[in-house]
Image (cartoon, helix red, strand yellow):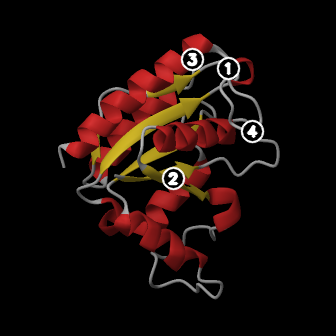
Amino acid sequence: MNITVVSSSTRKVRRSHRVALAVVKQIKVLGHQASIVDLIELDLPSFVERFGKVDDATGKLAHAADTMRISDGMIFLTPEYNGAMSSGLKNFIDVFAKASFEGKPIGVATVSVGASGGIRAAYQLQQTILSILAYPIPRMLTVGNVEKVIDESGQVTSQKFQTKLDEFLDSYLAFVSKF
């Protein structure tokens, strides 16, 4: 299978991207293909129009659209900001619209520096996934205290978290295989 992880923090100092790196590494260990659409690299314009109607001089948006098109599934990864998904992820969803996501199985992963792991953002994101005519997996990956469980390179440093990541990916990949 081919999975795309959308890493949605656009902050200069970001911790959630560690999770994207760890998820991609583990998907590859399990024998699948995985790539990251990194919103900091994509440098999306603020939403004014959908993909196809905005200037894409660098071709980055077209490349991201192609990556999503060939994906068997996606994982939306977001830090929790003020109890919600990142504005970067919301902008990404709005720019690419339903056609890029419709019918895709989408996993939810959220991150916080506190213990809750971004659960409020996760619930919000599941509702948004339904609105774009995609299929959210009920099991979510919530990562609390991220600095204590994954280092900057995406190396998992906690056996307890490794077990949680393995369980999430086993469920998610089984879910994707049904499509």
Question: Which secondary structure, mark 2?
Answer: helix
**Disc 3: which residue:** 161
The correct choice, above or below, for 42 with respect to 156 in the image is below
**Disc 2: which residue:** 90
Q: In this image, 43 relative to 33: left or right?
A: right
Q: Are marks 4 and 3 in contact (CB under 8 Å)?
A: no
* Near-viewer residue (177 or 78): 177
* Near-viewer residue (128 or 134): 134
Residue 175 x %, y %: 25, 37
Q: Quadrant of residue 115?
A: top right
Question: Which secondary structure, mark 3?
Answer: helix
Q: Are marks 2 and 1 in contact (CB under 8 Å)?
A: no
Residue type, mark 1 in image: Val
Query: Which circle, 3 or 2, is nearer the viewer?
Result: 3
Question: Which secondary structure, mark 4?
Answer: loop
**Disc 4: which residue:** 153
Residue 148 x %, y %: 73, 17
Residue type, mark 3 in image: Phe
Comes first in the chain, label 2 or label 1: 2
Residue type, mark 4 in image: Ser
Q: Are marks 1 and 3 in contact (CB under 8 Å)?
A: yes
Residue 170 x %, y %: 35, 29
The CA span between labels 2 and 1 is 26 Å
Residue type, mark 2 in image: Lys
The CA span between labels 1 and 3 is 6 Å
**Disc 1: which residue:** 149
The CA span between labels 4 and 1 is 12 Å
Residue drawn at point x = 31 percent, y = 68 percent: 99
Within 10 Å of the Cα at label 2, are there few (<14), some (14-19), or many (20+) other Cα atoms? some
Q: In this image, 46 relative to 135: left or right?
A: right
